């Protein structure tokens, strides 16, 4: 049993909203967006809001939306299956080289990353390695079924993205825990193909709303009723994208570990403790005696005893956590720190000198192209953790020493 520390918005015109936002900012636009979601007639009991909450497209990032008989594709988003993987090694901090630049360079060579505008750039494989081909072999048959119904998805750059990082807030990090154990951790998802799946079904749901003359408080909250033409296709495609994302992270972690072994002299193992979890996805679960569809957009499953990862921004600490199984949050917790500035605002307000000072202790990019990912663009991870103290227990506290950004 947990002592709850959430606040409740009851006057929504729909279901209540329970917010774990004590001590962290909640922007007016995100609050308004949550009120729109609460008005949907098929939301089960209430919406749970995590402390990293911020404005998203259609549905709010940091929200947990349980539904009966319908799915809102925008409540999952377009970065389907985005999530984290972490692996603790047998290395200690003293085993790392004094100059970490070579380790960062080795990881950057091993994991394609960056903005992708075609398979020949640094963000995708030109010739996918055998491990990517093997991973794709377990995905290609189901993908063919999806493409058979939705041919435009066949144009996505799926195989050449498998085992690649992407851009934005995706990263690879080398971290140290409270006992100076070395961890590898990374954040990525289903890449271009997941984006294409999410975008397609959001548009199909909007078309259905127009055809059925359904008016919504926000057109991006268009939904797919269970039993409708596209519902089963979407569930199948989202499940596939989640499997793609999990495979993608596993392949990258394998390559990160292999790259580290070319730089770190001491032999080591990296399977001591590993976590691989989604934070943009939908799942069938039972809550309060009913089977519901739970969409977590910027939220992580935190069933009792379940391990998860809550990263801070580059230059801030991160956490390995164990879920407390809080029923009021639908067994969920935050997926990170959450933005307090849009990327445009961050580029205007955060100087290069600010960014360099905030990441002085981390081997990472120090250029203007990543200032929108600087720690000042995010909420305090300590405040976020304090706000969700009844959702998770901290198992390990990690501090970054190397960060690779797209």
Image (spheres, rainbow, N blue to C red):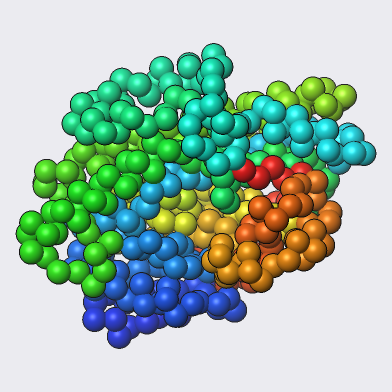
Judge left or right: residue 267 versus residue 54: right
User: Could you tell me residue 82's position as x and y percent?
Assistant: 48, 45
Q: Is residue 131 placed above or below 90 in the rendered structure? A: above
Q: Quadrant of residue 188?
A: top right
Return the residue nearer the eye: 289 or 27.
27
Residue 209 percent location from the top left of the image = 14, 59
The x, y position of residue 378, in whole percent, is 62, 65
Q: Nearer the viewer, residue 41 or 389?
A: 41
Side of 13 where 17 appears, left or right: right
Residue 175 seen: no
Q: Is residue 136 visible?
A: yes
Q: Residue at x 50, y 77 (%)?
A: 26
Give the residue at x 63% y 69%: 348
Q: Quadrant of the C terminus?
A: top right
Q: Nearer the viewer, residue 260 or 180?
A: 260
Q: Residue lying furthest left in this view?
A: 212
Q: Is residue 304 left or right of residue 235?
A: right
Query: Viewed as shown, does residue 323 lie left or right of 58?
Result: right
Q: Is residue 247 above or below residue 14?
A: above
Q: Is residue 29 above or below residue 269?
A: below
Front-most of 399 and 314? 314
Q: Residue at x 39, y 40 (%)?
A: 194
**Quadrant position of residue 150:** top left
Q: From this viewpoint, which residue is outermost toward the top?
A: 130
- Residue 241: image location, x then y, percent: 38, 37
Name the residue rendered at 80%, 34% in the picture. 103
Number of residue marks: 0
């Amino acid at each position: 049993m947990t002592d709850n520390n959430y606040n409740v918005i009851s006057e929504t015109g729909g279901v209540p909203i329970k917010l774990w936002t004590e001590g962290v900012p909640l922007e007016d636009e995100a609050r308004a967006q949550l009120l729109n979601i609460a008005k949907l007639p098929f939301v089960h009991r209430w919406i749970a809001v995590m402390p990293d909450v911020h404005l998203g497209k259609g549905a709010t990032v940091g929200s947990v939306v349980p539904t009966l008989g319908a799915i809102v594709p925008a409540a999952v988003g377009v970065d389907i299956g985005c999530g984290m993987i972490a692996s603790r090694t047998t290395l200690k901090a003293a085993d790392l080289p004094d100059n970490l630049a070579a380790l960062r360079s080795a990881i950057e060579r091993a994991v394609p990353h960056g903005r992708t505008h075609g398979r020949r750039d640094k963000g995708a494989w030109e010739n996918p390695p055998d491990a990517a081909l093997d991973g794709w072999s377990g995905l290609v048959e189901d993908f063919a079924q999806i493409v058979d119904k939705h041919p435009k998805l066949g144009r996505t750059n799926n195989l050449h993205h498998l085992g690649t990082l992407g851009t934005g807030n995706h990263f690879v990090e080398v971290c140290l825990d409270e006992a100076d154990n070395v961890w590898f951790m990374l954040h990525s998802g289903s890449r271009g193909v997941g984006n294409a799946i999410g975008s397609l079904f959001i548009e199909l749901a909007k078309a259905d709303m127009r055809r059925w003359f359904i008016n919504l408080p926000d057109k991006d909250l268009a939904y797919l009723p269970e039993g409708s033409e596209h519902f089963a296709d979407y569930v199948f495609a989202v499940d596939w994208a989640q499997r793609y994302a999990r495979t993608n992270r596993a392949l990258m972690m394998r390559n990160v570990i292999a790259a580290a072994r070319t730089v770190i002299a001491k032999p080591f193992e990296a399977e001591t403790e590993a976590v691989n979890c989604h934070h943009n996805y939908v799942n069938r679960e039972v809550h309060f005696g009913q089977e519901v569809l739970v969409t977590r957009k910027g939220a992580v499953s935190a069933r009792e005893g379940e391990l998860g990862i809550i990263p801070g921004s580059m230059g801030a600490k991160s956490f390995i956590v164990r879920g407390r199984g809080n029923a009021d949050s639908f067994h969920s917790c935050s997926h990170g720190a959450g933005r307090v500035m849009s990327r445009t605002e961050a580029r205007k307000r955060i100087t290069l000198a600010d960014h360099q000072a905030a990441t002085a202790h981390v081997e990472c990019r120090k250029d203007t192209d990543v200032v929108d990912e600087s720690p000042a663009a995010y909420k305090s991870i300590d405040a976020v953790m304090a706000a969700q103290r009844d959702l998770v227990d901290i198992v390990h506290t990690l501090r970054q020493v190397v960060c690779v950004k797209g």
